[in-house]
Each structure stands twice: as C-alpha cells, then as structure tokens.
C-alpha cells in the first residue's frame, strides 16, 4: 500500500484533534473528487513499518482523539489487507482513541458478498471503526454546511452501535445553518 499524506493535528476529518492517513488507490473516481491524484495506487510513498511507527508516535499525545483513514479509498481490498494489521496495533496501543474511516463505498456494498470492496478482512476492519463516513461524493448533492461530508447522500455511521444492533445507526449531526440537532 502507498499513502499520499499524513496530517497531524487535523480537525477537519472527524471529531477532535486527529491524525489523518490519506491512503492511495481508488476505483470510485467520483466526479470532482477533491484528491484525484490519490486514485493512483502508487501515488505518494510506500506504507512501511517506519510509517506505522511514525503514526503510532503521532497518536501518543493525550490531546489526539484518534486516527482517521481517508484516501484514495481505505476499502480497496489491497488497502484493507495492509490497514487491518496496522489498526490492530493502534487498538492495542491506544484502546481509548477513536478510529474514523471515509469511504466512497457504502456499508451495504462492503458487507455484500461478491462486491468489489468485500474481502477476507472487511468485517474485521469494520469492527475496529468507531465511525464510518460512507458513500460516494456526488457533485449534484454537494452541501458545504454538512459536517465531515461533502454531499448529502453520505452518512455518518456509528459503527459500534450499528454492529451491535444489526442495522445502521447514524450519528446525530449538528446542522450548522440552524444550530439544531438533526438525524441524518
């Protein structure tokens, strides 16, 4: 796996101050994607043991709430196979830190047998997430007032509650226009 960027002290891609890993490779190719260079599976630098150690060090400070995975596409099967062992290390070292992932695939696609993103480690990867932001970016549904999403079709899924309930449970969202709590 390759990665395009690592951001420390990121406040745009999940709740709180986070460390963000932008993985490379994406087959979704959403129209007007904000990072089309990450579609290339060899964009950036190789994700090595040194990269993993660097990320673990960045996660250490108590003010860092967690790790966010973006792309590119974390749920491309080849990326999942690299991310799962790394996330095991993150969970072992920092069990109280949250893990968010952004994906152009929907949760239903990830769980459907025979679909492109589904592979032998998908369920384990999903089980390690606290929040999944799913769905392709759709230019016609772009809404800059949404938190952590670019278009209104994308969902903020509470993965712990979703897996426990056996049905999708969305996070409540704060509508910036009115300041009221909304269910998305």
Image (tube, rainbow, N blue to C red):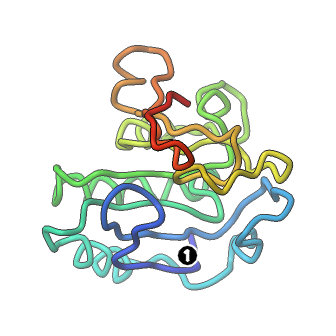
Whether 136 is drawn above or below 85: the answer is above
Residue 75 horizontal side relative to residue 104, left or right: left
Assess disc 1: are there few (<14), some (14-19) or many (≥20) residues with their C-alpha within 10 Å of its C-alpha.
Answer: many
Residue 119 lies left or right of residue 41; in this view the side is left
State the residue in front, 61 or 42.
61
The spot of residue 83 in percent (x, y) is 45, 58
Where residue 120 sits in the image (x, y, percent)?
53, 38
Relative to 138, say whether 120 is above or below: above
Quadrant of the rendered image containing residue 42: bottom right
Q: Is residue 78 above or below residue 6?
A: above
Where in the figure is residue 137, as x and y percent of width and height? 74, 51
List the single residue furthest toward the left.
Answer: 62
**Residue furthest to the front:** 178
For the image shown, how many numbered marks are present on the structure? Answer: 1
Q: Nearer the viewer, residue 169 or 74?
A: 169
**Quarter of the N terminus within the rendering:** bottom right
Q: Give the residue number, with chain letter if any, for mark 1.
A: 3
Name the residue located 48 percent from the left edge and 29 percent from the top edge.
Answer: 170
Q: Residue at x 29, y 51 (%)?
A: 98
Is 177 placed left or right of 89 in the picture? right
At 17% from the left and 50% from the top, the residue drawn is 95
Q: Residue at x 69, y 41 (%)?
A: 152
Quadrant where the C terminus sits is: top right
Q: Which is more toward the observer, 31 or 80?
A: 31
Query: Could you tell me residue 17's position as x and y percent?
Result: 31, 67
Residue 60 left/right relative to 167 = left
> Image height check: is 55 above or below 172?
below
Q: Secondary structure at mark 1?
A: strand
| Displayed quadrant of residue 166 | top left
């Amino acid at each position: 796996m390759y990665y395009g960027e690592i951001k420390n002290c990121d406040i745009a891609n999940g709740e709180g101050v986070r460390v963000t890993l932008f993985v490379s490779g994406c087959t979704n190719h959403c129209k007007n994607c904000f990072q089309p260079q990450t579609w290339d599976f060899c964009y950036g630098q190789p994700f090595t043991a040194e990269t993993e150690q660097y990320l673990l060090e960045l996660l250490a400070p108590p003010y860092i709430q967690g790790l966010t995975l973006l792309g590119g596409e974390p749920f491309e099967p080849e990326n999942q196979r690299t991310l799962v062992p790394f996330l095991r290390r993150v969970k072992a070292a920092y069990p109280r830190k949250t893990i968010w992932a952004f994906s152009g695939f929907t949760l239903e696609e990830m769980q459907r047998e025979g679909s492109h993103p589904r592979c032998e480690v998908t369920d384990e990867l999903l089980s390690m997430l606290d929040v999944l932001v799913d769905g392709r970016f759709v230019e016609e549904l772009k809404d800059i007032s949404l938190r952590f999403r670019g278009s209104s079709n994308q969902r903020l899924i509470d993965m712990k509650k979703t897996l426990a309930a056996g049905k999708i449970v969305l996070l409540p969202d704060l509508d910036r226009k009115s300041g009221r709590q909304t269910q998305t």
